[in-house]
Image (cartoon, rainbow, N blue to C red):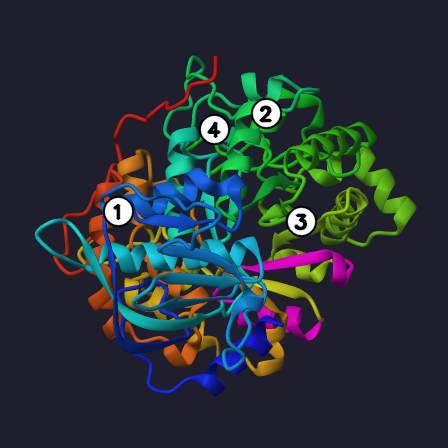
Amino acid sequence: MRRIFTCLLFAFATAAAEIQVIPRPVDVRETDTRLHLTKGATVQLADTKTKDLVLATLSEAAGFPLVPALASKPGSIQFLPATTLPDRIPVPKGEGYVIRITGEGANVHAATPAGHFHGLQTLAQLIRSGERDGQGAISLGGAQILDAPRFAWRGFMLDESRHFTGEAGVKRLLDGMARYKLNRLHWHLTDSAGWRIEIKKYPKLTTIGGRGNESDRSADAPAQFYTQEQIRGIVAYAKERHITIVPEIDMPGHADAAVLAYPEHDGGGFLQKGNKDKWPHFTFNPAKKETLSFLDDILKEVAALFPEAGVIHVGGDEVHFGWHEWPKLQEVQALMKKERLKDLAAVETWFIRRMSMTINGLRFQTGGWDEIASRDLPRDKSLVFWWRHDKPQVLHDALKNDYSVVLCPRRPCYFDFVQHDSHKVGRRWGGFNPLSEVYAFPAALKLSAADEKQVRGIQACLWTETAVTQARRDFLIWPRLVALAEAAWTPDSRKDFSTFEQRLPAEIEWLRAKGIKPYDPSANSPEIGDLGAKPEYPDKAE
C-alpha cells in the first residue's frame, strides 16, 4: 500500500516547491494564502495519549506555548483522519501523511498514529523556519504536502559494547531520529568488549561481563549496563516516537564478555598480535547442551524486554576468526559425527539454525549480518543485514534467494569511517564516507525494481572503537544521519544534494540547540578525535 500511495503522489504532482524540511517531502504545492500563528494557538489532537509530546514539539518550534483546542472548536492546528481529505487528494496509508496549510489553519491528515507523528515533525520544521514579525507571530505560506516513505526500515545501529552511551544519550539520539523520521534503532548490546543488558537469570553477565570498555580493560573498571527497568523505559520512550528498538545479542562469536562471566561456555578464540586481551575467548561453545540452554534463557529475557521488536539480531559474523579451538572440543567432535558435519562452517550453520529456532519460536524474525545468508534459514523468518560492501555478490545472492535485506554496507553507511579527507581519526577502506555519499545511497547499487521489493530498508552503523566520548560520537553521527534519513525516506527522483545542503544549516542549528556538536560541512569544523581520551562512565549502574 505504501508504494501505491507513493505512485499516486507522483501522478498527482506538478512542479514541487522547495520548503525547509528534511527529509524532503514527495510532493509540495504552494498556495497564495498565509497562516498566522500567535501565542496561545490551539491544537486539536488525534490521540490524547501523546498530547504532551505533540504540544512540546510544536511549542518548541514556535518559541511560544500552544494549547489543546476545545472539543467544540477547530484548532489552529488539527490532526485529522485520512478520510477527511477532499476526494481529489490521494488518501495516505501507513506512515504517509498529508498537510494542508490555509489561512484558517494547518491540518495533518493520516491513517495511522505514525503518519500523524511524521506529519508533526514536518509541521514543526515549517513552524521553526516560518517568518516572524516583531511581536513573535509566525507566518506560514499556504501549502499542500503529500508524503510517504521510500523504505519501511529507516535505521541506525549504535554499538554500546565498545563504549557505553547511557540512558540520557540514547534518549537524545532517539529525539534526533524522530525529527528526521527514522524508525529503527538497532541496539548492539553485547560484544567482546562488554555486555550491556541485564539478564536476571545470569547476573554475572553485567557485574563481570559489563566491566570496562574498549579503552579501559582494567579489573577495577566499573560495570556499565542497562537495567531491565531502564530498557523498558527506553523502549517506551522510543515507541512514543514511533521508533522500534531491535536488540542484538552476538553469537556464536564476539562472546568474550559473556565468557569472562561464565567461562564454562567458552569455545575459544584468537589473539591479536601483541595483545593478550583481544580476543582469547571469542566464541561460545557451539555444541554444548548447557551453552545452548544458557543462550535460550538469555533470548527469552530479551524477547520479553523488546516485545514489539519483530526481530532479534544474533550477529553471526566473523566467527571464523575464533573457531580454531572448536575441533578440540568434545561436544563439537560429537556433534560433527552425529550430524555428519564436514567442517567448521557447517558447525556454525548448525548453531545458527538451532538458535534461529529459539528466536522464531518466540515469534521474532532472526536478524543477522550477511554471513547468515548462507545458513539456509527460513526466508519468511529471517532478515539479512548486508554489511560487506566489498562483497556485492553476497547481496545479490541474498536477494536471489528471496531473503529480505537491510542495506548497511561499510561504504558509505559505517559512521566510524572518517567523513572528510582532512580528518585523521577513523577508518578508511578505499576511501571514506563523506556526507554526499551517504546522501546518494543506495543509488550506486542500481537495484532493480524486483530487488527493491525485497529491500526492507537502509541503516547507518556506528562502531565505537574510536568513539570514546559522547562528543566524538555526536561528531561522527551528525549530520550524516540526517543525510541517511533523507536517503531512506525521499524517493530517488526527489533527492537533490544541492537543495539538501541549503536546508541543512537550519538543522545544524537545531542539533546544537539540543546540546549536540555536529560536524559542520559548510565550515569544515575541526575534527573531534578523542583517541587517548579518558573513557566516560555515564549512568553508572550500581
Is 506 positioned to the left or the right of 69 in the image? left
Mark 1 to mark 2: distance in Å?
29 Å
When the figure is inspected, residue 463 is found, relative to residue 206, above or below; the finding is: below
- Which span of residues is magenta-colored? 377-401
Q: Which residue is mark 4?
A: 277
Disc 1 is placed on an element classified as helix
Disc 3 is placed on an element classified as loop
Q: Position of residue 274 (x, y in %)?
A: 41, 34
Q: Which residue is mark 3?
A: 310
Question: Tag 2 or tag 1, which sits nearer the N-term?
Answer: 2
When the figure is inspected, residue 498 is found, relative to residue 509, above or below; the finding is: below
Residue at image point 49% right, 42% down: 50
Callout 4 touching callout 2 (CB < 8 Å): no
Which mark is drawn over residue 511? Answer: 1
Callout 3 touching callout 2 (CB < 8 Å): no
Query: Does 11 lie within the magenta span?
Result: no
Q: Mark 1 or mark 4, which is nearer to you?
A: 1
Q: Position of residue 25 (x, y in %)?
A: 39, 70
Which mark is drawn over residue 228? Answer: 2
Q: Residues within 10 Å of mark 3 (few under 14, many from 20)?
A: some
Mark 3 to mark 1: distance in Å?
30 Å
Corner quadrant of residue 139: bottom left
